[in-house]
Image (cartoon, helix red, strand yellow):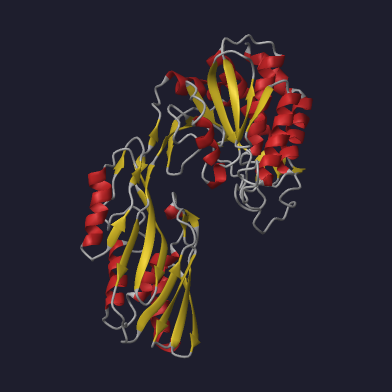
Amino acid sequence: MDRAQIEAYFDDPKRQEQLVQAISRLVRIRSVREDAQPGMPFGPGPAAALAEALALCGELGLSAQNHENYVGTADLNEKETRLHILGHLDVVGEGTGWTVTEPYTPKLVDGMLYGRGADDDKGPVVCALMAMQAVRELGVELNYNVRMILGTDEESGSGDIAYYYAREPYAPYTFSPDAEFPVINIEKGSYKPAFTKTWAPETATPRVTALQGGFRINVLPPEAECVVTGLSAAAARPYCDRSAAETGAVYELSEAGDDLRILCHGKGAHASLPEEGNNAITALLHLLCALPLAKVSSTAALHALNALFPHGDCAGRALGIAQSDAVSGALTLAFSLLEVNKHGLSGRFDSRFPLCATEENCKLAAEAAFAKFGFTVEGGMDAPHHTDADSPFVQTLLRCYEAYTGRTGECLAIGGGTYVHDIPGGVAFGCGMPGFNGNMHGADEHTCIQDLLTACKIFTQVIIDVCA
């Protein structure tokens, strides 16, 4: 197929209108996972989005099938399937702070389409479907089939894909347009153990009697708070000022009888990018270890945590697991959950490790570090995902990307996980162009229509090169 024909097909103004209208149909549906209902394993929203997407597939001339409302599939022909394209229709909650439009009221402004799911992942899904339509309408003869898999549970655990692949075979080649260009071929492994420590009842003061930090394992905590019994705000304030200067966090104090409540404000970030935030848990521990607390077991435990997770250490150096390699980069670590009460503590950290990590230099090293302070640790390592950058499939994707963007293609390694993490040979490919930020998962999520049209061209060429 001549590249000029693909360019002309998608440069037709009616394609932009078709793209916007199709994405908007899906964005209008609040497809957030809810409790399962009969025949709807992820609730009515994802099921409704799947029904609408399958109706769209039929309009585009594709053969569509609903797999028990776990996933939908769309096939271009009845031949042997060689390529899977994996996207999802479920979205995160709407959140607050929207200014351009309401979350489920799509709006096109200056070439950007706003709405929850426009960027993640309803826009990219439509791109792939329109690429399949283009191959059909341009009359390209394929020797193999391409199948679009429409997931409905990517944001909440990917139970949809587990269900599908337990019943259907993997394709020789798979990509997911649920990330960014050029190609993400490495997703780091994860080590997210839980640790605990207990102590006998204590009476000496001042001491920490309660602490709560973090709300989700994969989020760097933006806030953490504790109660210190037997210490006044006036006595604590100089220590707070000093710690604020050292950590960049903000400490808010309030008194209630003999209790001092300390609320620490940091800055949240994704756990795979801890350097982009300011960890409120470690900032609070930094302060607590400076306060004149009683020399009791709970205080010793807090000092131990501060030694294992010093504020600003996002690489696991103090824990003894810091490492990196030239292909997949460095290990990252986020201390993301901690709870302390009068009897003990429990916590978790989220580390993303490179290809060079082993059980000896990661899991066993961390357990040894905790053991020195009498902590109990439980949890194993989840393997990284790696598809060879020199594979013919990856090279085909890079070649198509370069042809339609004029940019140099390269393979990327990330700390996060995508839909293809457990799929042999799978990679993430598009739809975000380098440098674009659609504010996915946040207020005013949006996608660039021109970039999506370019992605349509790229995907069309990929389908032809892989399946013809």
In the foreground, 362 or 30: 30
| 64 up-or-down from 117: above or below | above
Q: Residue at x 40, y 81 (%)?
A: 228
The percent coordinates of residue 323 (x first, y second) are 28, 46
x then y, percent, for residue 123 = 66, 36
* Count of marks placed on residues: 0
Point out residue 444 in the picture as x, y percentages from the top left corner. Answer: 67, 51
**Position of the N terminus by quadrant:** top right
303 on left or right of 179: left
Q: Residue at x 49, y 19 (%)?
A: 396
**Which quadrant, please, contains the C terminus?**
top right
Would residue 199 be found to the left or right of residue 104 on screen? left
At which x and y percent is residue 8?
A: 71, 18
Asked whether, in this view, residue 390 is left or right of residue 398, the answer is left
Residue at 47% x, 30% y: name it.
Answer: 427
Asked whether residue 320 is in view, the answer is: no
As rendered, which of 272 and 339 lies closer to the eye?
339
Where on the picture, by quarter, is residue 60? top right
> Residue 31, located in which quarter of the rendered image?
top right
Instruction: Tell me: residue 98, above or below residue 114.
Output: below
Outermost residue on the front side: it is 38
Can you tell which quarter of the image residue 405 is in? top right
The image shows residue 355, relative to residue 174, as above or below, that is: below
Q: Can residue 187 be seen in this snapshot?
A: yes
Of residue 113 and residue 241, the one placed in the foreground of this image is 113
Residue 437 located left or right of residue 285: right
Vertical order, 427 against 231 (above or below): above
- Residue at coordinates 35% horizontally, 35% vertically from top-left? 327
